[in-house]
Image (spheres, helix red, strand yellow):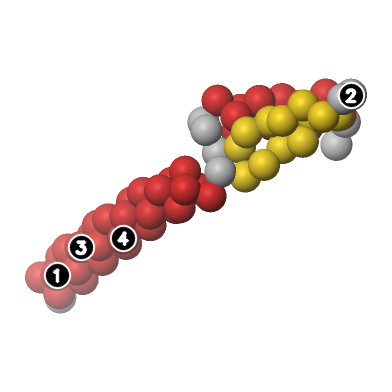
Amino acid sequence: MSFAAVQKHVKVLERAALVTKERRGREQIVHANGATMRRASALLDGYEQLWIHRVEQIEEILETQEGEKA
């Protein structure tokens, strides 16, 4: 991965408040923002559970339809 690509990825993470940058001389140190990552993880976990439930509902509907056809 090129340095420019890494910079772009870090910029996206920074805009999402998932990381912060700290300048130390010529270097920029990137720190993870744990609180924001935990909130993002909780949000994604909620969406995962939502979609698991929806897929299960679809499976039930399809099984019911297959039973009606027989």
Nearest to N terminus: mark 2 or mark 3: 2
**Three-letter amino acid code at disc 2?**
Arg
Dot 2 corresponds to which residue? 26
Picture layout, residue 64 above or below residue 9: below
What quarter of the picture does the C terminus occupy? Answer: bottom left
Q: Could you tell whether 13 is left or right of 42 in the image?
A: right
**Residue visible at 36% across and 49% down in the picture:** 43
Q: Nearer the viewer, mark 1 or mark 4?
A: 4
Direction from residue 27 to residue 42 in the image, left or right: left
The residue that mark 1 highlights is 64
Q: Is residue 38 left or right of residue 62?
A: right
Marks 2 and 3 sit apart, C-alpha to C-alpha, by 55 Å
Q: Amino acid at mark 4?
A: Gln
Q: With respect to residue 45, does 14 lie above or below?
A: above
The mark lying in front, picked from 1 and 2, is 2
Instruction: Identify the secondary structure beneath mark 4.
Output: helix
Q: Earlier in the sequence, mark 1 or mark 2?
A: 2
Query: Disc 3 residue type?
Result: Gln
- Distance, label 2 to label 4, CA atoms, is 44 Å
Towards the viewer: 11 or 64: 11
Query: Residue at label 4?
Result: 49
Frontmost residue, 14 versus 50: 14
Q: Residue 57 has which mark? A: 3
Comparing labels 1 and 3, the label whose residue is closer to the camera: 3
